[in-house]
Image (cartoon, coloured by chain):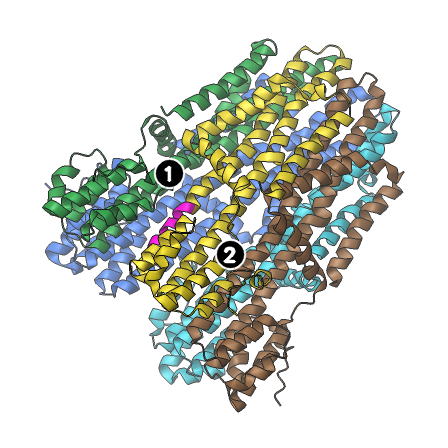
Chain colours: A brown, B yellow, C green, D blue, E cyan
């Protein structure tokens, strides 16, 4: 799990928990009916909004986003410059065996297309199409989580309205209003916590991860096309470094002495 | 009806109902005047906002979205690759009879255009135009439902304001404020439930459905153009697989041994 | 007046009125100062935001949107296919006299350009420019109404704040808070009703109307260019039908047996 | 000052003032500390958000928007058609002396470029670039005012929170809550008035003005290019009229008999 | 530190502080638990939303935005026109030594590319790519600060909900509600101040700074391409002045007599 997410998630829930415990009995904040309305309502609205497969795939996408290590831009530059050097020395066909060693499917496919002698425009076309649809699919995950992040506070408010109506209708002793109000507000609290401690930041994380994955894949496309056109490794490196921040550029060590 | 929608709809209303029943008399949540203001106001604003035909067509669109089975991406790939094989073996004219067997009008039309020897740019032009206008028409349904999802809470609030003004103006006995407030809040509750349990998730569903229909139709266009240009079935398959997730790619069985 | 708008407008205000009458004295909801703040404030902000001519033209645009009959897509297809038939039989010059019979200025101008032998790219250029600026002008009306729909609730809230401050500052008898609060809330009520019963749905209607007018004009452009290029009437019909829903396509009767 | 703005500004503040005076002592609505928080806070946040020069230039832009007379579309058409007539009769070089009489710098520059024999693509390129950056600069003014229109209510709310916390913490006599609450609400009132009576409508005005200035400048570009290409004055007129509403077209009197 | 930011930041916090001190004991506004919930919660959500490196880089970006002096448009025009003069007189190779004196890396790189005789399209391509990715990276900083500006009020509200629930549940003496409410509102106050006095204006500043940096870099690209194509210094000046406001144009002194 990447450190920031881990710290964020633990800290978020930890802070809520300690604020609750320090301020009195934590039981004040537990109400099964409220959990049902907010969690259940959010899930119900989400299931109606998205196909079951999309909702389930979010779990998968989240696991990837939280646990998989990202490909570093510097690593992909080094690898592609390495490939350029090999292609220069031994011909582009020599890349076939090297590509099959990498675990990155997209890179493998790109190299394969170049090795097969596919026309550059066609390579660009195929890979860009794949990129565009990958972006669309990843957007589904963000969209589901963002929807959950807006449904949760809405159902929190609905729960509070139910509680208020039930309490106000039968109230006769003003001194008991406080307790009823407290219970009614619990659903609003649940909704706000679910949205802000989990759903919205998780949706944001997916967006950030998608952006950095797309960047790496765009670098692969640029790199492969550059290699195929016979550019020398220095030019390949130059072109790829334009994609990254100056701070990262200096971290790239392409093994040339 | 697709399972997720069904579960979502039932669960959403079921949860509201049980929260209401468990917390006291369900009669507290029934007020005919409130129904009139929220449901009536929402419909009135929607009718003013959209032509009658658009509002009525939403019912139709919703029925399609909830009950019609979607064309699966893997099925359309298999069918198009099958067509490519036939076109290779028996010539493109042989597709005419096969196309007439499918129930998909868009596919039929596409094949017909190819069989008629229409120029590729013209085919692309005609089908893309049709796609664009289909997207526009589908957007109307989402737009109507989204509008209803914003009008409903607004009329809920208007109803609550009416109730509050009527109650506050004549109040003399503070102990009766509770009951009046409860009644006033019912319209806000109705508006929030209508928007979040039905209108907004239904609008979201239409958006998702439109996106997946468009994807399938884009695959048809790509596939037909590829077949017409004489690509071999493997290439057609490659091109189409770029549109879908890796997980779906492996599900495609194009019948080649 | 088109039926949906009429029903919507009457029903919207009718529902508000009956909710008010059924709940007690309608006089509770009348306060001249409140009308002044909300209606006056909204108009003032709108006049500051837009040139006088834009604000006045909204009345005109609304009258068009509510009372003028829209050109039906099926009618324009039939007319254009008819023109195509005439052009085929009697030459394109024969269209001149037929065009002058139609009341649609845009169609007349388009035919005139074709009859004058203007180059197709130039026709497309001139008509598309006109379309784009027409869209911009129509957008002004929507923009004014949308602005009014956001200013109205804002001035409603400002009125309520004025009322609250005045009441709270001099209150000494808690039993009189109710009445003051009721009066203060009236402006919020006015603002919410003005926005949701009139301004926002009317802005929405203009948007819908503009979209359907643009569609008809795009069909005219496509049709004229197709006729000028000598397409046969069937092809013209095919091209135009791509613009409309399948349900409308079957309604087109182009008079060919 | 253009009439609508003037009426709007006076009416807006006038309405607020009369509602305040009619409802009791206007002193209720004056609190120096509240002015400081809302006005000061809004300015502070704006200064942090924008460079000092941008904030100061808003004053300038506003003066232009409120006091300068706009160039009328019909006037610019007449002038450009006049230029076209001159260019036809006396050659394009004859425009030099006429252009130097106009006070419109952009028109002068455009004519100069044409007179200098600059290639059409280059003229278009230079003028379009200037237009694009002019639009960007004008957008700064709108952006500053819109930001002020969102900061003002936010600092209004912050002021109210400060007032509420101070009052609630020391309250022991419930009968004094009213007065404290009234004072606390004054900042919210200030924020809402500043945003809705001034900042937001003024930002809207800038947007409208920019749009109409851009339109006039686009007409100048189109007209100059048309004149340079030797179009006859009637064609120039036709092309320019496509930019404006039919109602304005009939107002154009190009002095031809 | 640029003056406006400095004044804004000091004034913002100063105003809050004086409003607090003038209204009573400042201790009313200090509650360590509240700081923990709002500051901690905002940080936790941000860390979950963004990779640690992005969050840390915001500090760096902010320091740049607040302390680094911006390149003035007029300075860059003067420098580029100077380069054009040198290139004219001594040939483009003479620029190499002059470029190495400037501290602007982007300018150096641009000149180097021109000196190396790189093809104009390639120069444009490389520099535009670098610009686009620079814009993306800067957008990260704005995005992080904007996210913090929305999380802060949300956690403020969550803290208030926690406080309200704890207070209301155990209340028996209505006279003590005031104090509890005051404490509960402190978190809302913290959230609103953090967002409006710091996060949102700081995010806005980054946006403004990025826009002006991009403008300067676009001028460098335009200028270098113009110089490389052999344009004379006057033309280079003309082209660059189209990027800036008329007011700035007159400030440019290109040292020609």
- Mark on residue C247? 1
Drawn side of residue D249 relative to residue E151, left or right: left
- Mark on residue B153? none
Give the residue at x 44% y 53%: B217
Mark 1, other Cα within 10 Å: few <14 / some 14–19 / many ≥20 = few
Q: Main secondary structure of the magenta part?
A: helix
Q: Chain of mark 1?
A: C
User: Can you give x and y, in whole percent of width and height, for residue C142 in the image?
Assistant: 42, 36
The residue wearing badge 2 is: B75
E170 or D38, nearer to the observer:
E170
User: Can you give x and y, in whole percent of width and height, for residue C96 in the image?
Assistant: 13, 41
Give the residue at x 53% y 77%: A112
B131 part of magenta stretch: yes
Q: What is the tally of numbered marks visible in this picture?
A: 2
Give the residues in magenta.
B125-134
D133 part of magenta stretch: no
B108 or D171, nearer to the observer:
B108
């Amino acid at each position: 799990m990447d450190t920031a997410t881990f710290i964020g998630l633990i800290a978020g829930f930890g802070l809520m928990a300690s604020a609750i415990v320090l301020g009195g009995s934590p039981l004040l904040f537990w109400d099964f009916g409220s959990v049902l309305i907010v969690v259940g309502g959010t899930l119900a609205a989400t299931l109606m909004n998205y196909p079951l497969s999309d909702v389930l795939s979010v779990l998968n996408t989240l696991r990837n986003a939280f646990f998989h290590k990202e490909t570093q831009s510097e690593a992909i530059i080094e690898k592609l410059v390495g490939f350029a050097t090999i292609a220069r020395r031994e011909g582009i066909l020599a890349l076939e065996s090297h590509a099959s060693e990498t675990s990155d499917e997209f890179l493998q496919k790109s190299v394969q297309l170049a090795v097969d002698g596919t026309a550059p425009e066609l390579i660009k076309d195929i890979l860009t199409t794949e990129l565009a649809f990958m972006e669309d699919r990843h957007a589904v995950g963000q969209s589901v989580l963002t929807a959950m992040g807006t449904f949760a506070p809405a159902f929190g408010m609905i729960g509070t309205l139910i509680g208020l109506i039930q309490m106000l209708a039968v109230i006769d002793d003003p001194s008991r209003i406080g307790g009823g109000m407290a219970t009614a507000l619990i659903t609003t609290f649940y909704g706000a916590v679910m949205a802000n401690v989990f759903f919205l930041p998780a949706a944001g994380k997916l967006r950030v991860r998608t952006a950095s994955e797309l960047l790496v894949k765009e670098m692969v496309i640029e790199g492969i096309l550059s290699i195929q056109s016979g550019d020398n490794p220095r030019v390949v490196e130059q072109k790829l470094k334009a994609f990254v921040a100056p701070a990262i550029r200096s971290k790239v060590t392409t093994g040339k002495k």
